[in-house]
Amino acid sequence: MKPYKQKSPEAYIRLLNLFERELKKYHTIFENNSYQINYVLSRKKYTNDCEIKVVFSIQRTTIFRKLINESQNLKRLLETYCRYFSVSDILIVRPYRQKRGKSTGDEITTIPIEERLTIEMYREPEIWREIIN
């Protein structure tokens, strides 16, 4: 019998660093910092498996201007890239209110992956059964 050893969060952080670094090289749409990616790791009970959910938050609408001449939409591009990392749960969101007016050239500050990562301990709820005497 093989001993059960859970993967450390540092291993997932290294994987997600690789994910973001290669995403910028994957397509020209992802080169800029007009988006932020948050991650949700869901561990499965009694296994070493973990599901990764990607939440792609659009910060600026400049990403849509680059999509005008593309044959695929943003979700399709992101889904095909995520297949390399076996990620199937993708969510794309944008803010409810957009800032109007001219865009100043200021860059969005990038937050480290450690602060954008959320770990769910147990995804499936516990089932309690009533004991009948």
Image (cartoon, rainbow, N blue to C red):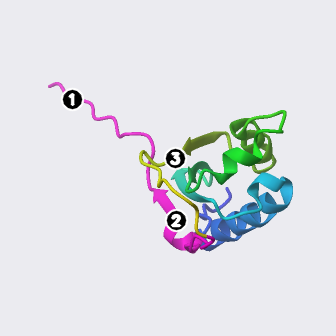
Q: Which label lies toward us, 3 or 1?
A: 3
Quick one: 38 or 132, which is closer to the camera? Answer: 38
Around disc 3, counting alpha carbons within 10 Å, would you say few (fewer than 14), some (14 to 19), or many (20 or more)?
A: few
User: Percent x, y for residue 72?
Assistant: 80, 34
Q: Which region shows up in magenta? A: 105-133
Marks 2/3 in contact by CB < 8 Å: the verdict is no
Q: Is residue 132 magenta?
A: yes
Q: Which label lies toward us, 2 or 3?
A: 3
The residue at which mark 1 appears reads as: 130
Q: Is residue 31 magenta?
A: no
Q: Amino acid at mark 3?
A: Arg
Quadrant in the rendering for residue 24: bottom right
Q: Which mark is residue 94?
A: 3
Around disc 1, counting alpha carbons within 10 Å, would you say few (fewer than 14), some (14 to 19), or many (20 or more)?
A: few
Quadrant in the rendering for residue 90: top right
What's the residue at 61%, 40% (across, down)?
89
Q: Amino acid at mark 1?
A: Glu
The residue at which mark 2 appears reads as: 116
